[in-house]
Amino acid sequence: MKLKIAVLVALAMSGLYLPAVAQSTDSVMLRKIFDEALVNGKCYENLRYLCKKIGPRLSGSAGAAKSVQWSKTLMESYGFDKVYLQEVMVPHWERGQKEQGFIVTGNKRVPVALAALGMSVSTPATGITAPVVELRSLKELEALGAEKIKGRIVFFNRPFDNRFIETGSAYGTAGDQRNAGPGMAAKYGAVAVIVRSLTAAIDDFPHTGGTNYGNNPKIPAAAISTIAANKLSAMLKKSNGQPVKFFLKTNCRTLPDVLSYNVIGEIKGSDNSNKYITVGGHLDSWDLAEGAHDDGTGVMQSAEVLRVFKAIAYKPKNNIRAVFFMNEENGHKGGIKYAEQAKADKEEHIAAIETDEGGFTPRGFSFERATPAFLTNINKQWKKLLEPYETDRLVAGGGGTDIGPLKESHPGIQLIGFRPDSQRYFDIHHTPNDVFENVNKRELELGAASIASLVYLIDQHGLSF
Amino acid sequence: MKLKIAVLVALAMSGLYLPAVAQSTDSVMLRKIFDEALVNGKCYENLRYLCKKIGPRLSGSAGAAKSVQWSKTLMESYGFDKVYLQEVMVPHWERGQKEQGFIVTGNKRVPVALAALGMSVSTPATGITAPVVELRSLKELEALGAEKIKGRIVFFNRPFDNRFIETGSAYGTAGDQRNAGPGMAAKYGAVAVIVRSLTAAIDDFPHTGGTNYGNNPKIPAAAISTIAANKLSAMLKKSNGQPVKFFLKTNCRTLPDVLSYNVIGEIKGSDNSNKYITVGGHLDSWDLAEGAHDDGTGVMQSAEVLRVFKAIAYKPKNNIRAVFFMNEENGHKGGIKYAEQAKADKEEHIAAIETDEGGFTPRGFSFERATPAFLTNINKQWKKLLEPYETDRLVAGGGGTDIGPLKESHPGIQLIGFRPDSQRYFDIHHTPNDVFENVNKRELELGAASIASLVYLIDQHGLSF
């Protein structure tokens, strides 16, 4: 008991706790937010519509265009103060016909699950066949050099490191194989690249995702399933130096850029007519499924934040915006445009929160500009308020791709990432499994309420910790 | 910064932090435990076998008998110091043929998804048809009394209260309808009871579970799906006083008690030959599916705790036991027997941890004997160690059904409940959906590692907070 008293005294002396009345008002408001989202929540049924009636919505596709119009109508139906489209030119990449992949040894062809990486170039119509060289890293590629790479298909096969507790870290450290691997392999003369799907799951569907050639030559690049990767690796080990070849045929193409839109809804602030808090996710999705967790959940949660505020009659001090960004997956053009426009319009931005890690049970938030003092103080002030909802992990970390450009345009801004439970995300991310059925209603709603709670606290108290 | 220093001074003065060396040893051990469980984990494949090769294992069934023998062989294969069966007589209830249920209005019969409650008596072979009276609570039943209940089928239809953040609380507060409802309705002359399935999900399969008539007469009792419950309720509202009837036919029976077993594996302690830490779940399951999350995950995690200790060559001070309890679902006989035997053998029990809330991402643990001082101090000591694994919510709360009887037999014991994320549990609990495919490998393994970590800390430092 002595300790407890000592700590309480220290805290009381520090003056960092809000006065009892303010604490109590905040608690009541958070409870109202959660009750509204859990009892009258709309984001789950909205997500059902987006997934089932619209479906895939890669930038430039008919689905993307349809989703823009529907999203605008949806936000208008909630009576937000302002709902509008923000023009943005986006890349238009198409997968084309389903791809083919085979492991080829002698006369045997073993079919494997394969999908072209986003933005990659296509193979010739006859496909590409070449000997495979298996690598675990870009370093190994450099060590082998052009002599051993030229004319071959590079197979990047470094698996997720399962020791990471948050799967995003495993994704982050394996991701260079997909992002930079194809361009670098091209530099050394590879004719194509196949990449082990970025997932801890041992499954038989390919996990797509974008690649970025940079200034390197462009060669066809595709993901293969982890089961296929294990099979190919085993065959290479057993081959005793006999060449194991791979055949792939992809049919993708990049068309001219297309006019598309960020969809923006806004509740006007009562006090600060030029100050903004943004909450957003991305409306575009990969083409293989419905973009449910990536990132239908994020946009539907963002709209839900504003809807909940209206439903409980909360009048924010600052302008609160829900932004459905376009083109996160293969270009980030929507995020770039949003920051440019905000700067051109001389808007002041306090904070932006991105929800793009799936609609799973909330755990907390990460803050990009997080000094030790900031973390200590924000935890002292707000952790107790968020703890009853188990969304109280306030840590240092990234905001998100869409809000990233605001860092340069608005140096004072705090960028915040919503952090739900990460364990299931990379089972379904960028795969045919990213469908509505894999979203849990309560997990989605708890996330929306968590984000609304943080927006409320920032709106009331600012972020000057 | 002033606050931080003040708090640190207070903490340092309190002497509650472990010396730096001990902290560091503990951190290293926890990291080893997690690495072993996440990289070389066996519980997921063991669970696959239990679910797919054995399947349902209600007490007294062939599946239960098979699971006992397999579990013993499994633990023996890991070379634990002692593996044995503990005899226990258990009830033997059988569902029999699939049940039938219809809403009956005039000449119309609307089929509904229905399953008899565990331990309930059967309808006559011709079924039961009677007018329905819809109630929200046992209080309403008492208020109506025998006059309005006699000869009717009572329909308990109070839904989950979605405002609870942890779904276990919603289950707890709705559960009286299933547990006590049938017996109480029988007391007032009802001829049968149908209960809205205990779930927040709006789905079309019945969620079974046990009922307990107490000293009341026994009448047939069944769960209906939440979709069926909503349909029936809507039809009652629209009926304008015209009787809406319900037909049900169940085919269950209770046979004589059967000899079964708790399955126990043990690693001997190096220092304390008569002191025990127990970790357990229950091996029996409902008959409608594979008992994956309820509670295949719990028993497989319990064995994994001991396996991990052996794999990392950890020699505990105290005896560590993994107990696969029999008959949690419809009688608790295994838990009762374990406590009786432990008392008869004059064993000292430090703590027992139960894992019976599903194999989801760990969040922490609840402690039954938790004074404010205990909670403050255990959090001061151990929260930082568990925080990197996000399993650091150390709160007051229940242990579990199987370990419950140890409270009376061993008054000094601490009973602990493993608390994973609760959002999805009641979507699948007691339904045909409780299958292996709904368990995530990493979530399961993280849970096993969390439990092993807590057992390690208790073994090293005790629980005298």
Image (spheres, coloured by chain):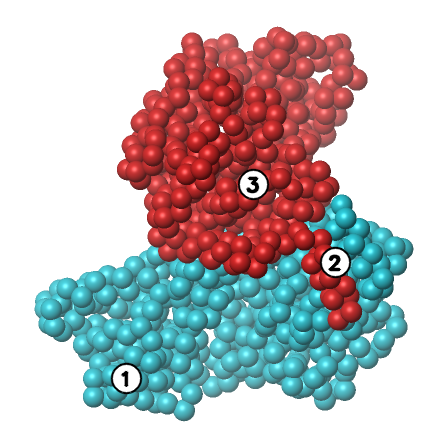
Chain colours: A cyan, B red
Crowding near the residue tagged with mark 3, few <14, some 14–19, many ≥20 C-alpha atoms within 10 Å: few
Question: Which quadrant would the N terminus of chain B be assigned to in this image?
Answer: bottom right
Image disc number at residue B10: 2
Q: Residue at x 77, y 48 (%)?
A: A2
The x and y percentages for residue A214 are: 42, 87
Q: CA distance from mark 3 to mark 2?
A: 24 Å
Q: Secondary structure at mark 1?
A: helix
Does residue A327 show up? yes
Q: Which residue is mark 1?
A: A143
Residue at 37% over, 56% down: B39
Q: Nearer the viewer, residue B201 or B89?
A: B89
Name the quarter where the C terminus of chain B is drawn: top right
Distance Cα–Cα, label 1 vs label 2: 54 Å
Q: To which chain does the residue with label 1 belong?
A: A
- Precedes in sequence: disc 3 or disc 2: 2
Amino acid carrying label 3: it is: Gly
What's the chain of the residue with tag 3?
A: B
Q: Chain of mark 2?
A: B
For mark 3, give the secondary structure: loop
Mark 3 on the same chain as mark 2? yes
Q: Is residue A189 left or right of residue A79?
A: left
Identify which residue, A358 or B15, lies in the foreground: B15
The residue under label 3 is B462
